[in-house]
Amino acid sequence: QQQVKQSPQSLIVQKGGISIINCAYENTAFDYFPWYQQFPGKGPALLIAIRPDVSEKKEGRFTISFNKSAKQFSLHIMDSQPGDSATYFCAASIEGYGGSQGNLIFGKGTKLSVKP
Amino acid sequence: DVKVTQSSRYLVKRTGEKVFLECVQDMDHENMFWYRQDPGLGLRLIYFSYDVKMKEKGDIPEGYSVSREKKERFSLILESASTNQTSMYLCASSSEQIGTSVGEQYFGPGTRLTVT
């Protein structure tokens, strides 16, 4: 019940195309869904996050779509660029203060390659 | 600017050695975490700490211990290194201040440990 399942494991997209990465969860108590971006040789960094009171959040070319009833959320990268090539992790947590309830549960990651 | 630093980027140790990985954050964050990252397995939580001198086991604590004597420093200890502990180790921190999300974690650059 604590798992977050992420797909695909790897993705190749042409420059200018749309990249889509999907995640699914089981625990309905999760209420915070971030996406992290990791470039080679660097630690992951928060890219964008959503809470279940909205169905979509957009920041520039990056959009999270959230489907509460299906327990799924996805990251869309519009007009994908070679500089977007990185590993993307979805995650989920129960927002709170103190104790393990706030810990992030990560998906296994998607390696995105954007071809010029 | 937010910063999490790790003592080494690359480390090579022999089987049976005691290994110390150090992590320091300069953001006065309450929470600190140690993860290991392996291809296809994503980020797995080893230990975490919500306060000085406090520690809790994560999902894969076997073979590891931690120490948090000061708020800004969180150390991961491999008591007797084994080859199956060859991995990328990532430290992270987050705040518990009102108005922030415990889920917003800031990561260090990682230490790639090889045990031979």
Image: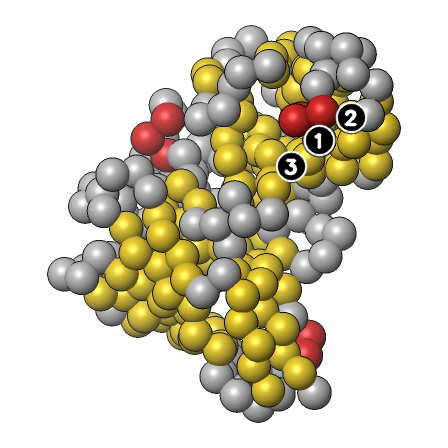
Against B79, is A85 above or below?
Answer: below
Q: Secondary structure at mark 3?
A: strand
Which is nearer the eye, B1 or A55? A55
Q: Are marks 1 and 2 in contact (CB under 8 Å)?
A: yes
Which is nearer the eye, A53 or A13? A13
The amino acid on which the numbered mark 1 sits, given as a three-letter code, is Thr
Task: Name the residue that disc number 2 marks.
Answer: B115
The amino acid on which the numbered mark 2 sits, given as a three-letter code, is Val
Q: Secondary structure at mark 2?
A: strand
| Residue B86 position within the rendered picture, expressed as x and y whole percent measured from the top left | 71, 31
Q: Secondary structure at mark 1?
A: loop
Label 2, label 3: how far apart the Cα atoms are: 17 Å
| Residue A89 position within the rendered picture, expressed as x and y whole percent measured from the top left | 50, 55
| Chain to which mark 3 belongs | B
Disc marking residue B90: 3
| Residue A20 position within the rendered picture, expressed as x and y whole percent measured from the top left | 43, 74
